[in-house]
C-alpha cells in the first residue's frame, strides 16, 4: 500500500534536500524563510557557528506598527524590507537564500524580492 505524505512532510523532505546544498558561511550567511498561515518569519543564519545573526517576522513590533497582516504578500514584502534593513545594519550585504522547501511563489517570492530591493544580494 502506498502511503501519501501530507503537505508539510513533503515540504520538510524538500527542505532537507535543499539544506544539503545550501550552507551559510561567515561571508555569505543563509537567509531562511518559514511561513505559517497567518505569519511569516525570516532569519539570517551562520551555519558554521550555528548562530542566528538577524531575525525578522510579522510578529515584530516594527511590523505591527505598519498595521499589515503577516499572512499576505504585503506582509511578506514588509518582512523582507525589515530583514534587509537589519542585516545591512550588521554589515551583512550578501546572503544565500533558503526558501525552506516552499515553492518560490507568492509570499516567499515577495519576501525575497523586497529583500533584494532593500539592498541584500543573492
Image: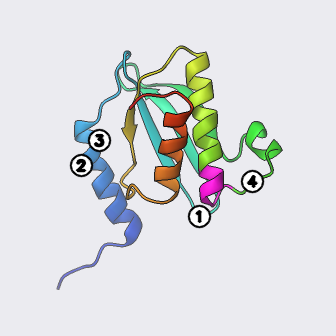
CA separation, marks 1 and 2?
A: 23 Å
Closest to the camera, between mark 4 and mark 1, is 4
Q: Earlier in the sequence, mark 1 or mark 3?
A: 3
> On the image, which quarter does residue 48 sit in?
top left
Residue placed furthest toward the bottom: 1
- Earlier along the polypeptide chain: callout 3 or callout 4? 3
Asked if disc 4 and disc 1 are in contact, CB closer than 8 Å, the reply is: no
Q: Are marks 3 and 2 in contact (CB under 8 Å)?
A: yes
Question: Which comes before the other along the chain, label 4 or label 1?
Answer: 1
Residue shown at 56% from the left, 24% from the top: 87
Q: Is residue 33 left or right of residue 62?
A: left
Residue at mark 4 to residue at mark 2: CA–CA distance = 33 Å
| SS state under label 4 | loop
Please give the name of the residue rendered at 74% of the width and 42% of the height, measured from the top-left corner: 63
Q: For residue 19, which numbered disc appears in the image?
A: 3
Q: CA distance from mark 1 to mark 3?
A: 23 Å
Q: Quadrant of residue 90?
A: top right
> Can you identify the residue that label 2 sits on?
17
Say the numbered circle drawn on residue 68: 4
Which residue appears farthest toward the front when viewing the image? 117
Q: Which residue lies at the image location 39% right of the left edge and 49% below the top edge?
A: 100
Closer to the chain start, of discs 4 and 2, is 2
Question: Compared to 84, does 66 lie above or below?
Answer: below
Q: Within 10 angstroms of label 2, few (less than 14), some, or many (20 or more) residues?
A: few
Amino acid at each position: 500500500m502506498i502511503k501519501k505524505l501530507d503537505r508539510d512532510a513533503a515540504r520538510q523532505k524538500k527542505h532537507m534536500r535543499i539544506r544539503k546544498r545550501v550552507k551559510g558561511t561567515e561571508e555569505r550567511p543563509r537567509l531562511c524563510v518559514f511561513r505559517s498561515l497567518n505569519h511569516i518569519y525570516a532569519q539570517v543564519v551562520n551555519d558554521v557557528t550555528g548562530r542566528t545573526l538577524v531575525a525578522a517576522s510579522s510578529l515584530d513590533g516594527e511590523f505591527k506598527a505598519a498595521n499589515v497582516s503577516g499572512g499576505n504578500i504585503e506582509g511578506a514584502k514588509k518582512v523582507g524590507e525589515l530583514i534587509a534593513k537589519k542585516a545591512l545594519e550588521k554589515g551583512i550585504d550578501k546572503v544565500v537564500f533558503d526558501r525552506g522547501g516552499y515553492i518560490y511563489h507568492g509570499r516567499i517570492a515577495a519576501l525575497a524580492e523586497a529583500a533584494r530591493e532593500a539592498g541584500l544580494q543573492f
